[in-house]
Image (cartoon, helix red, strand yellow):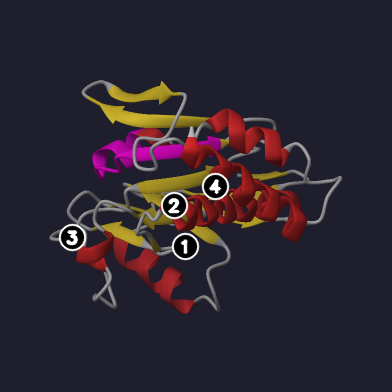
């Protein structure tokens, strides 16, 4: 089954063995298509320009915010995060270690059997995934997930019952979804360099408030 849209292409394969998923993931050139594996179901997602632009701009705002606020982060980008014991794996659009940045920084590879998952996962999902991603992220212990549907950003924090919507980031205190949305809405009117520069200036101005 496949679904094609302007922002991304999704292809879903069923009854895929874990070993086959690993072979496919390792056999790619780069990180496209991005893969999500959930107990035998494998989704291949090829992002197009809209998808990539939104995800990368959000990532640049995370990096600018953390720089101005002096928050140490570690960019994990689209790393393949795997848990063979759960038969699950995912590759986010963007991801960051924040609370665990110092712990993960010296490691070339992350083993989620012993290492913590990324503190923040960013997903652009303009077309609906066939995999229940939030359930997968919760099973793998991701503390905070941001999801953008092409129109707006939703921030979510893990709780006993799954993920709960939040207005502002827990890992990056003071960074609200509304602020990111306001700048993303202007991405067609201003160049990225100018947009991120203005974003950084607003964050710096807020330090005195």
Mark 4 element type = helix
Q: Mark 3 or mark 1: which comes first in sequence?
A: 1
- Please give the range of residues in magenta: 135-147
User: Picture coordinates of residue 205 (x, y %)?
Assistant: 57, 42
Across and down, in percent, residue 159 comes to 25, 25
Which numbered disc flags the more N-terminal residue, 2 or 1?
2
Left of 157 or right of it: where is 84? left
* Residue 3 - label: none
Q: Nearer the viewer, residue 18 or 132?
A: 132
Q: Residue at x 53, y 69 (%)?
A: 31
Does dot 3 land on a helix, a strand or a loop?
loop
- Whether tag 3 and tag 2 are in contact, CB under 8 A, the answer is no
Q: Is residue 161 in sight in this rendering?
A: yes
Res 124 seen here: no
Q: Secondary structure at mark 1?
A: loop
Nearer to us: label 4 or label 3: 4
Marks 1 and 4, Cα distance to the nearest angstrom? 25 Å
Q: Residue at x 44, y 69 (%)?
A: 25
Q: Which mark is residue 115?
A: 3
Q: What distance separates the C-alpha of mark 3 from that of mark 2?
A: 20 Å
Query: Which is nearer the N-term, disc 3 or disc 2?
Result: 2
| The disc label shown at residue 36, or none | 2
The residue positioned 75% from the left and 36% from the top of the image is 185
Distance in Å between CA atoms under marks 4 and 3: 33 Å
Name, please, the residue furthest toward the front. 208
At mark 2, the secondary structure is: strand
Q: Dot 4 corresponds to which residue?
A: 204
Crowd around label 1: few <14 · some 14–19 · many ≥20 (10 Å): some
Residue designated by label 1: 77
User: CB under 8 Å between callouts 2 and 4?
Assistant: no
Kindly report the distance in space between the C-alpha atoms of the residues bearing marks 2 and 4. Answer: 37 Å
């Amino acid at each position: 089954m496949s679904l094609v849209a302007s922002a991304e292409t999704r292809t879903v394969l069923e009854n895929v063995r874990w070993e086959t998923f690993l072979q496919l993931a390792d056999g790619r050139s780069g990180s496209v298509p991005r893969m999500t594996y959930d107990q035998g179901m494998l989704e291949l997602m090829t992002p197009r320009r809209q998808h990539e632009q939104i995800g990368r701009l959000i990532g640049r705002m995370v990096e600018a915010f953390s720089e101005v606020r002096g928050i140490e982060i570690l960019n994990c980008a689209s790393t393949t995060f795997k848990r063979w014991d759960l038969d699950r794996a995912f590759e986010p659009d963007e991801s960051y270690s924040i609370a665990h940045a110092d712990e993960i920084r010296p490691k070339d590879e992350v083993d989620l059997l012993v290492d913590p998952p990324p503190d923040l996962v960013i997903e652009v999902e303009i077309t609906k995934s066939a995999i229940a991603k939030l359930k997968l992220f919760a099973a793998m212990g991701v503390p905070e997930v941001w999801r953008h549907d092409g129109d707006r950003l939703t921030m979510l924090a893990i709780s006993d019952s799954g993920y709960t919507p939040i207005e502002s980031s827990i890992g990056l205190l003071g960074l609200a979804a509304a602020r990111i949305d306001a700048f993303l809405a202007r991405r067609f009117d201003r160049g990225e360099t100018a947009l991120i520069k203005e974003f950084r200036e607003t964050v710096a101005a807020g330090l005195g408030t």
